[in-house]
Amino acid sequence: MTGTERVPARRPRNRKAQLADSAAELFRRHGYHQVGVADIAATAGVTGPALYRHFRSKQDILAHVLLSSMDAFGLVTEEALARPGTPEEQLTALLEAVAALAVDRREVTALWRWEGRHLDRADQTKIRHRSGELMARWGTVLRDVRPDLEPRDAELLCWAALSVFGSVSLHHVNLPRRRLEALLATLARAVLDWPVPDTAAAPEPARLASWQLPSVSPSRREELLTAATRLFRDRGYHAVSMEDIGAAAGIAGPSIYRYFPGKAAILVAAGYRMADRLARTAEAAVGDAVDPADALARLAESYVDTVLRSDNIMATFASELANLPDRDRKELVRVQRNYVARWTGLVRAVSPELSEADARTTVHAALTVVNDLARTPRIVARPRIAAELTSLAVTVLSARK
């Protein structure tokens, strides 16, 4: 061998895992439809053809990422619960282990809930079965600690705790790793300790009679906005056509152009409508409060009410912001940050010992609990879900390390 001869590069044995990790981070940061196969290959340092040696398509990559994430989540769960100790000690070990996993691999506890709609039916079924098994496993150990809990209530609390861990996938915070892990475990434990109210003893909220409901029908523009955002939420922005929106609103697709110049304009309008609604309800909630703690509770109540009345459109914008025009995206992100800052300020007013980063992490966890549970059919069907979501959010906001 001469000095000018090159040694053939040896293909890493874990190339498939490297590609999956690169894809997972890109999907988390930008959303499934904003990421191309070429982006994944470039991030992993390979060519497109090399990627296709391991995966058939981008959808195949997503399925591998999500199912692998579920496997990692399940492995951490089983290892924590296999440790010797009391149920209380096992539950503590579980929360610590999942907190570490959530910080180390932020896609694990979030991607499969947000991006699973892009999979084919068979893979969606696998995800549902695996997530159901995991939550059942969590529910078993929680009921060992709290034997008074009904299975359906344990399920509610386990999903809420999972949302706390998943919240870190949606924002970046400057906290030391150990501190962030400890804070997430504390917030999740506060959720699992939440005293579920007796729904049999609590009166049902009053409902408006038919003669009390507004008699003015929504405008055609509002009907289109409502129909479009529901479709965006259920299928994803890129999977919805103007014809789909028209059909959902009961008009021909081309007629939509009388009201909106294109699909992106509908998403923009819906985003500003939601931002305005949140700002108005927050202003009213805080304005009626007697102190910061009361303001925080009223703010949580107003947020839950807005989410439930709006078909949880907030879940849509968390995953569809990348599809907005650059100027509108930046403006709505600014509005969103200001809204979170208002919550953060109130949390610190109630607990001045908290740092800005601690308080902001706590706020994001509370908001994610509301957003996630409001889009989970079995959970949102509970008879007093609005009061329960409000109380859970306040519980997260008032938890302390």
Image: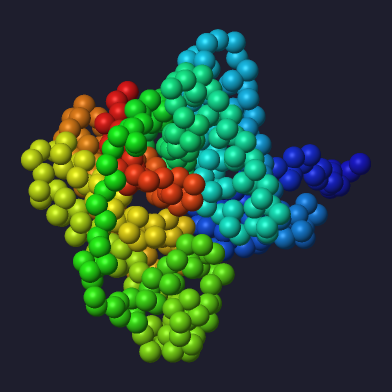
Q: Position of residue 96 (x, y in %)?
A: 49, 24
Q: Position of residue 115 (x, y in %)?
A: 56, 54
Residue found 36% across the figure and 85% down from its top: 259
Residue found 49% across the figure and 51% down from its top: 377
Write down the quadrant of residue 394 in the picture. top left
Q: Note whether 119 is above or below 380 in the view shown.
A: below
Q: Nearer the viewer, residue 369 or 362?
A: 369
- The quarter of the rendered structure image containing the C terminus is top left
- Left or right for 302, reference 104: left
Write down the quadrant of residue 274 in the picture. bottom left
Residue found 72% across the figure and 60% down from its top: 57
Q: Nearer the viewer, residue 22 or 339?
A: 339
Q: Position of residue 287 (x, y in %)?
A: 10, 50
Q: Position of residue 28 (x, y in %)?
A: 52, 50
Q: Note whether 367 is above or below 264 in the view shown.
A: above
Write down the quadrant of residue 185 in the picture. top left
- The residue sitting at the top extreme is 85
Q: Is residue 63 visible?
A: no
- Left or right for 400, reference 15: left
- Left or right for 272, reference 318: left
Q: Note whether 376 is above or below 224 in the view shown.
A: above
